[in-house]
């Protein structure tokens, strides 16, 4: 690609997701493009800049990155960080003139905060455009460039093509979800469903195993029956069923249970706000809150709920001939 429309790209938030996303951009943007980055953790900035000299440049704060870039991406943990990066204080993105700039927030936050930031930008810089674009696919997906973006944007939006081309350098799919904040609504709804399935799968496996069934047989049964789903097939919560699942590797390198708790709570809040009735919301939230605080589960993949609920992880011992 040799388009001048990506000459200066900004990226703020160089954590588990942001750093590999910048790596993808550094590999795939046109040769002349420069990437300006900032994180409150200076070592994260220094590390990526030294990995890509003359390509990735250190910004002193969010304002500095915004001044030097025509498109700015953000990838920070929670709503308070998004507010701080965009609107609060003297070094935020909006403390400089961002007229005509494109701003894309990839953080998973609540829809109300995202709309608040968008409204603030629309009011103060009418020619700037702000989009929510949360991602799915995890750290490994970010490293491989295979994440999916759920974009809060309509099919008719004049910026859609430009945004899609940029995001496609970091992921395999960009799904326009219809309008502002709907990318986030889609992401929260997805993670609610995925979180509930992981709990249900753990409970169903546990009851089957306690009744004498092998978890491998149970998994075959679900796959052939009406319970077939991706969590059982590829992220099975029982260790040793699917070799590549985080559960089979000590529940490591997955989607941290604390992140699931955060997303699940955001989804339950959203459901309350829009008047959707949940019968599983409180039970799910309680489970992920408990698992997040349990030292046996904290910092591990969210499918560790199987352990939290008392499932037998050592079933292979018993099955040995
Ligand atoms: P992380 O905590 O690893 O990284 C966040 C980075 O933001 C950190 O480096 C932090 O220093 C930086 N930061 C915080 N406040 C800042 C500020 N004011 N200015 C500049 N930098 C700031 O988090 P992550 O795992 O990269 O996740 C980022 C977002 O992506 C979260 O909303 C998360 O829910 C979402 N997400 C994560 C995953 C995953 O598997 N990790 C998957 C999908 C979506």
Image (cartoon, rainbow, N blue to C red):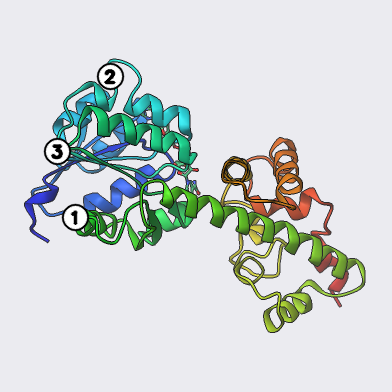
Q: Earlier in the sequence, mark 3 or mark 2?
A: 2
Residue 310 or 198: which is nearer the viewer? 198
In front: label 3 or label 2: 3
Name of the residue lying farthest toward the right: 211
Q: What element carries label 1?
A: loop
Determine the residue positioned at 29% across, 23% down.
92
Looking at the image, residue 298 sits to the left or right of residue 103; the answer is: right
Name of the residue lying farthest toward the bottom: 224
Q: Name the residue under label 2.
A: 91
Alpha-carbon neighbours of circle 1 within 10 Å: few (<14), some, or many (≥20)?
few
Q: Please state the total of marks drawn on the protein image.
A: 3
Q: What element carries label 2?
A: loop
Q: Name the residue under label 1.
A: 158
Measured in 3D between alpha carbons, the distance from the residue under mark 1 to the one under mark 2, in whole angstroms, is 30 Å
Measured in 3D between alpha carbons, the distance from the residue under mark 3 to the one under mark 2, in whole angstroms, is 19 Å
Mark 2 near ligand 1 (CB under 8 Å)?
A: no
Measured in 3D between alpha carbons, the distance from the residue under mark 3 to the one under mark 1, in whole angstroms, is 13 Å
- Can you give x and y, in whole percent of width and height, for residue 130 in the image? 28, 41
């Amino acid at each position: 690609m040799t388009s001048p429309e990506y000459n200066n790209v900004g990226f703020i938030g160089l954590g588990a997701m942001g750093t590999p996303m910048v790596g993808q951009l550094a590999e795939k943007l046109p040769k002349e493009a420069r990437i300006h980055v900032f994180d409150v953790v200076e070592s994260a900035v220094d590390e990526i800049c030294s990995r890509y000299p003359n390509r990735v440049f250190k910004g002193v704060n969010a304002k500095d990155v915004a001044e030097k870039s025509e498109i700015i991406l953000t990838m920070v943990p929670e709503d308070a960080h998004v507010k701080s990066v965009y609107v609060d204080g003297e070094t935020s993105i909006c403390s400089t003139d961002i007229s005509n700039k494109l701003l894309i927030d990839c953080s998973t936050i609540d829809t109300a905060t995202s709309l608040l930031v968008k409204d603030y930008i629309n009011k103060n810089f009418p020619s700037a455009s702000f989009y929510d674009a949360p991602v799915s696919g995890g750290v490994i997906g970010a490293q491989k460039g295979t994440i999916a973006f759920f974009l809060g944007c309509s099919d008719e939006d004049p910026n859609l093509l430009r945004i899609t081309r940029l995001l496609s350098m970091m992921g395999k799919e960009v799904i326009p979800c219809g309008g502002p904040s709907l990318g986030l609504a889609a992401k929260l709804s997805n993670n609610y469903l995925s979180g509930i399935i992981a709990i249900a799968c753990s409970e169903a496996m546990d009851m089957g195993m306690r009744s004498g069934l092998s978890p491998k047989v149970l998994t075959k049964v679900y796959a052939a029956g009406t319970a077939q789903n991706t969590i059982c097939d590829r992220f099975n919560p029982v260790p040793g069923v699917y070799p590549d699942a985080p559960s089979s590797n000590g529940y490591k390198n997955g989607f941290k249970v604390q992140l699931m708790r955060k997303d699940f709570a955001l989804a339950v809040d959203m459901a309350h706000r829009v008047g959707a009735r949940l019968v599983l919301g409180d039970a799910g939230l309680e489970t992920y809150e408990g698992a997040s605080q349990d030292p046996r589960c904290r910092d591990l993949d969210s499918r560790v709920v199987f352990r939290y609920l008392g499932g037998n992880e050592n079933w292979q011992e018993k099955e040995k001939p």
